[in-house]
Amino acid sequence: MDKIVVFETYYNPIEANIIKSKLMDADIQCFLTDENIITLNPLYTQALGGVKLHLFEKDVDLARSILQETIPTPETSEEEKGEYVCPECGSHNVGYVQATKRRFSILTMLVSIFLLVYPFSVKKVHHCFNCLHEYD
């Protein structure tokens, strides 16, 4: 009888399902545990130890080799990749996120104070995670 082992644990159920699907496509039988409870209540992730991917012990080496394969991609320029470059430091570590410095406009703040609610409109900007510069 083959022994079933915990191959890996994931803190994101979506990532676990992607890996499971990739292994199932390669005819490696596997299943996930604790997926449903963590999907329903993500706060249980640490308590349960994440989503566990189980498979047969004989398939561990094959699974590792499948997951280490990388698909070669053609070279593309920076404009085609859609990457942004920070004008201050030249870093590519830039994301389009909620503003940290000037979050709310004056109109949003006035309406929020008048209605006694948290500001409902938030400004999004390009934010460099290296030098913390924000730009539109």
Image: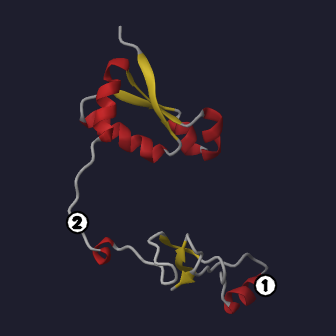
Q: Position of residue 94 (x, y in %)?
A: 48, 72
Q: Secondary structure at mark 2?
A: loop
Kind of residue at badge 1: Ile
Q: Which mark is residue 75?
A: 2
- The quadrant in which residue 106 appears is bottom right
- Seen from the viewer's position, the closer of residues 86 and 49 is 86
- Seen from the viewer's position, the closer of residues 98 and 86 is 86
Q: Which mark is residue 54?
A: none
Marks 1 and 2 close (CB-CB < 8 Å): no
Q: Which of the two labelled residues, at mark 1 and mark 2, occupies the earlier sequence position?
A: 2
Q: Residue at x 53, y 74 (%)?
A: 128
Q: Please state if 42 lies on the left or on the right of 33 as rendered.
A: right
Q: What is the C-alpha distance between the residues marked 1 and 2?
A: 51 Å
Q: Which residue is mark 1?
A: 113
Q: Residue at x 79, y 79 (%)?
A: 116
Visible in this render: residue 29? Answer: no
Q: Position of residue 56 (x, y in %)?
A: 36, 20
Q: Residue at x 46, y 78 (%)?
A: 90
Kind of residue at badge 2: Glu
- The quadrant in which residue 109 appears is bottom right
Q: Secondary structure at mark 1?
A: helix
